[in-house]
Amino acid sequence: AELLGEEEEEEKKTEDDALAEVTMVPRGGSWPGDDFSAYMPPEHYEMMYQQQYGQTYSRLPPPPVETVPESLTGAELLDKVFGTEWAKKSEQIRQRSRYGAVKGWQLASFITKAGEDVRKEALVMQVITKLRCWFGKDLPENMRPWLRPYTIMSVGADAGIIECLTDSRSVDEIKKLSGMASIADFFQRAYGPPPVRRGPPDLTAPPPVRPNVSLEKARDNFLRSLVGYSLVCYILQIKDRHNANILMDRDGHIVHIDFGYVMGEAPKMSKVPIFSESAPFKLTTEYLEVIGFPGGQFVRFMQMFEASFRCAAEHADEIASVIEAAMMMVNAGDDAASQAAAAAREVRNRLRMRPTRKEQQIFIKGLVNNAIYSWGTSTYDWLQGTMNGYEK
């Protein structure tokens, strides 16, 4: 496999230009001849903020993003937002590669992550991989959620290599690039029928290029992936679910990434009650607009969530064992074993089936209602938008 990384051109500077920009500050930060004052660069305050709140603070607003013209629809809009399809890009690189004729040649894209413990992300990916396998074997096709496992390799306590998800963008980026306020609007323009032109038809204009999937199929993809990741977030109590940590691919699936806060852990700022992600999983009004609520495909969402919950509950002991073993490696200290055992018990309790089908349906309905009407989801999105510029 060949690794593909994005290359950025940096402005070249001479040594004299670079030295001219250096501010000479003595070690410790104090200016010469001044024993009572200290020079604190702007980066110092940013580091203090990160240490206190565990969150990157943007001093300046994010740079403006060029949005697509309103006239773009269908495949043209998808190409503008997602770029060239990975299959086409891969074939172009294969033809230029000296190893392109080698049997089994495949292009892979990875990122390196440092300063964070990716073992938690690897734990989540183990559970996602197992759930995807069980769903494929135990559930009929019309009740089968969609999940996208990807490779995570831990190379140390605070570093790892993570596979890039191709043909995908974060929901935050999609909204900024498309200039649309909601996912439902994006679906309508990207996958729906072309808008009716007013006035006489332009016979010289080329016919619009339609996407690979229809609007109905894109909504079905969205629903299946929403069920799958809602269940994963509930089982593992995954937090920090803002729109920069949720991707959407070219076919309409959503994919959750960046699992730094699991099993009850949360960013420090979300521990403030008003910003607490108290919902069992993220299910916003925006998501419901895509699948249709009330009515529409929402009934199917409930049925699929109930079926996938039952499937996961049948394997609760195996999921709990995986989590207990992984948490033993992640946690340190004398109480690591007790913490891991407690995490496993919590998972078994969350996947506990109720005595009757009616009671189970009432329980599922309660989870979904809590997710829909949780004010913590919207306030946390607002907080992330205010601090980091992420779209809500």
Image: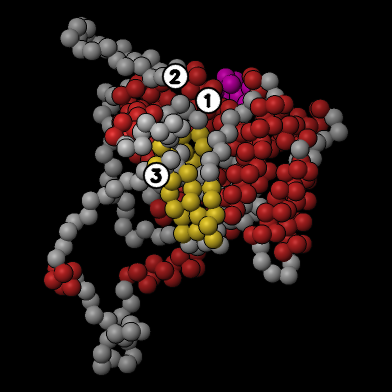
Q: Is residue 334 above or below residue 377?
A: below
Is the Cβ of the residue at disc 2 closer than 8 Å to that at disc 1? Answer: yes
Residue 267 is inside the magenta segment: no
**Could you tell me which residue is drawn at 37 percent across and 31 percent down?**
101
**Could you tell me which residue is drawn at 75 percent across and 43 percent down?**
318
Whole-percent x, y for residue 137 in the image: 70, 26
Spatial CA distance of label 2 from label 3 is 29 Å
Q: Neighbour class for label 2 at 10 Å: few (<14), some, many (≥20)? A: some
Which is more foreground, mark 3 or mark 1? 3
Q: Which mark is residue 221?
A: 1
Q: Which mark is residue 3?
A: 3
Q: The disc labelled 2 sits on which kind of residue?
A: Val
Q: Which mark is residue 213?
A: 2
How many numbered marks are there? 3
Whole-percent x, y for residue 5 in the image: 35, 46
Q: Is residue 373 visible?
A: no
In primary-sequence order, the first of circles 3 and 1 is 3
Relative side of 5 to 153, left or right = left
Whole-percent x, y for residue 214 in the image: 45, 17
Q: Neighbour class for label 1 at 10 Å: few (<14), some, many (≥20)? A: many
